[in-house]
Image (cartoon, grey):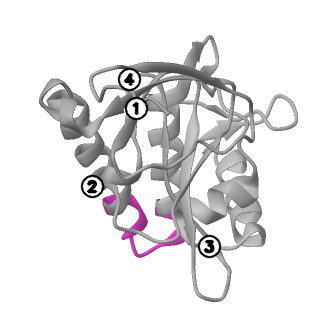
């Protein structure tokens, strides 16, 4: 069987919910779509490590966490790039580090209210679409997904979302849609 050259960049398309294959020698540079990186505790509780979109770099070489999984949230188009090409990916690697630290900062907030609020702002800035009434988080994300990001329970997230809605921070014009009422 013929081995492909490490310099060859492969284009791949993945369906929503599909797992992106992991390889210690390859990165995935996302061109389109959204993925979620995650792991689990020893008890089997899920932990979100991040949400990544177009222009973001993901892959096993960027993580020492085990188990580690990359799941497509939407249809995804990505480039598979060998680690020997890292010199061409410096900006993407820096961006990955910055985003990881930003999420770590958010989840280390002491109050769940603040964690959720900052996470919603982060999601709106990264995946949002400007609307007349605010910023639509243009990503199908459940209360359970939000709970996994901030290290909480779905019940707590639901209560906090209701509180944030009453305060006028967000609105939910339809099921699974969140609009932040930011100036």
User: Helix, strand, or loop for circle 4?
Assistant: loop
Q: For marks 4 and 3, give the CA distance.
A: 29 Å
Is disc 2 surrounded by few (<14), some (14 to 19) or many (20+) residues within 10 Å? Answer: few
Name which of mark 2 and mark 4 comes first in the sequence: 4
What's the residue at 42%, 65% (across, down)? 107
Residue 110 within the magenta-colored segment of the rendering: yes
Name which of mark 4 and mark 1 comes first in the sequence: 1
Across and down, in percent, residue 2 comes to 44, 29
Q: From the image, tell me which residue sits under label 1.
A: 3
What's the residue at 69%, 63% (across, down)? 157
Q: For marks 4 and 1, give the CA distance.
A: 28 Å
Name which of mark 4 and mark 3 comes first in the sequence: 4
Q: From the image, tell me which residue sits under label 4.
A: 55
Q: From the image, tell me which residue sits under label 2.
A: 101
The extreme front residue here reads: 1
User: Helix, strand, or loop for circle 2?
Assistant: helix
Q: For marks 2 and 4, give the CA distance.
A: 17 Å
What's the magenta region?
105-114
Q: From the image, tell me which residue sits under label 3.
A: 152
Q: For marks 2 and 1, give the CA distance.
A: 37 Å
Across and down, in percent, residue 158 comes to 76, 61
Across and down, in percent, residue 81 comes to 35, 29
Is disc 1 surrounded by few (<14), some (14 to 19) or many (20+) residues within 10 Å? Answer: few
Name which of mark 3 and mark 1 comes first in the sequence: 1
């Amino acid at each position: 069987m013929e081995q492909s050259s490490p310099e060859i960049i492969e284009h791949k398309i993945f369906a929503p919910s599909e797992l992106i294959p992991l390889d210690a020698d390859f990165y995935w540079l996302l061109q389109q779509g959204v993925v979620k990186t995650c792991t689990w505790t020893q008890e089997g509780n899920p932990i979100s490590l991040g949400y990544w979109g177009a222009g973001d770099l993901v892959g096993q070489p960027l993580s020492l966490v085990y188990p580690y999984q990359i799941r497509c949230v939407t249809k995804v188009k990505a480039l598979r790039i060998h680690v020997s090409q890292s010199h061409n990916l410096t900006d993407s690697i820096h961006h990955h580090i910055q985003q990881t630290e930003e999420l770590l900062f958010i989840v280390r907030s002491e109050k769940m209210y603040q964690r959720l609020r900052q996470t919603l702002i982060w999601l709106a800035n990264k995946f949002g679409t400007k609307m007349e009434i605010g910023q639509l988080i243009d990503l199908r994300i459940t209360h359970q997904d939000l709970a996994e990001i901030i290290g909480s329970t779905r019940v707590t997230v639901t209560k906090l979302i209701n509180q944030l809605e009453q305060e006028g921070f967000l609105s939910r014009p339809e099921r699974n849609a969140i609009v932040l009422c930011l100036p």
